[in-house]
Image: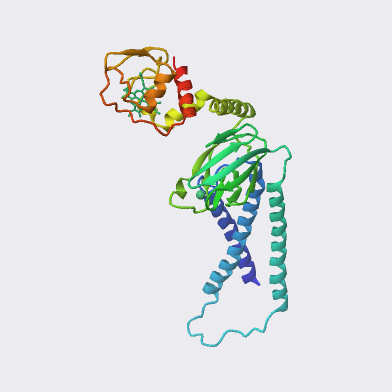
Amino acid sequence: MTHFVIVGVLVIVMTVLTYLGLDVAGLAEQMHPVAASAQAASIDQLWHWEVMVISFLFSLIVVPMLYSLVVFRQKKGELKDGEHMEGNTTLEVTWTVVPLIIVVVFAYFGAYSLGEVRRVDPNALIINVKGQQFTWVFEYPEYGIVSSELYLPVNRQVVLKMESVDVIHSFWVPEFRVKQDVVPGRITEYRITPTLEGRYKVRCAELCGASHAYMENPVIVVSAANYDAWIVEQAAIAAASQTPEGKGKILATQNGCVGCHSADGTQLTGPTWLGLFGKTENFLDGTSGVVDEAYITESIRDPNAKIVAGYPSPSVMPPYAGLSDEDIANLIAYIKTLK
Ligand SMILES: [Cu+2]
């Protein structure tokens, strides 16, 4: 009987020590970052209960084993066999029923926690997420905004409708705790209510190719007011990129024009575009002319037709045969804004 008491006490001591050890390790910044979502609460609670039970089960096995090894080891000169045992119904019933109860209780807690995590708020903000090798793209369908950063208002539920364009990815923000696969050809949902303002990172949690480890994008949780301001700003940018000037600016970047032509007067390989439209240009052959739509179009399609005075002949500017009339009109609209 005294053996049972001693082992019982040792098991309790060992449970506490194991739990404290695991808890300290688990709370280390890397393994258990700050909880930043409403969903994190029930998940963290479940985690702590599980660590507790794991500590107890570990002690329940290891302590009696070590105790028996030491206390009931074969003494010197002792040669006879150990006592023969024929089974013990009470013990067998106990070690079947007790674990069964524990498993059922945990199944209940698990289901409850899952319910909490998936709780639907009908006013949730909808954001479409696209995972692709090796980045995330966030689309705010109500505002026509596309962003590489996930901006979220604090204390409002968001539902991410996630899709992959290539292989399986997994959306994971450790501070939010919840993790969800992103699968090609299917839309998966991820609900979260951020509760703490700050900058976090979404990581891909499914090995998806060579640069999988770099598949990280910023997640920024801000106050409702700052979120609204960001939406207004982004919507303005999105709208601006739809105007001819906006499209022209994008074309100038895409086609590398900005590498040779500055918009602010800086001298690069080519003449600056600042104040270009409407001015009188002197050419290498001694003639001059006013910069209008026709001249700019000619300069783009056939850079050698007229070379600006002071620049080498033939022109270092490549001819852009691939640009459509509309592209050129947009580029001209953009150049016109640079006064
Ligand atoms: Cu990935």
Q: Which is more toward the observer, 42 or 122?
A: 122
Q: From what the image shows, is residue 334 above or below residue 161?
A: above
Colour basis: rainbow
Q: Residue furthest bottom?
A: 80
Name the residue: 48% across, 85% down: 77
Percent across and percent down for residue 71 are 54, 73
Name the residue: 62% across, 61% down: 56
Q: Is residue 35 visible?
A: no
Name the residue: 72% across, 45% down: 119
Percent across and percent down for residue 202 are 53, 43
Q: From what the image shows, is residue 46 above or below residue 139?
A: below
Q: Is 235 positioned to the left or the right of 253 in the image?
A: right
Q: Is 257 positioned to the left or the right of 247 in the image?
A: left
Q: Which is more toward the observer, 208 or 39?
A: 208
Q: Which is more toward the observer, 325 or 187?
A: 325
Count of labels shown?
0
Percent across and percent down for residue 60 are 61, 66
Quadrant showing the C terminus: top left
Q: Is residue 123 visible?
A: yes
Q: Quadrant of residue 122?
A: top right
Q: From what the image shows, is residue 158 above or below residue 70?
A: above
Quadrant showing the N terminus: bottom right
Q: Is 128 positioned to the left or the right of 25 in the image?
A: right
Q: Which is more toward the observer, 280 or 180?
A: 280
Q: Quadrant of residue 93?
A: bottom right
Percent across and percent down for residue 337 are 47, 17
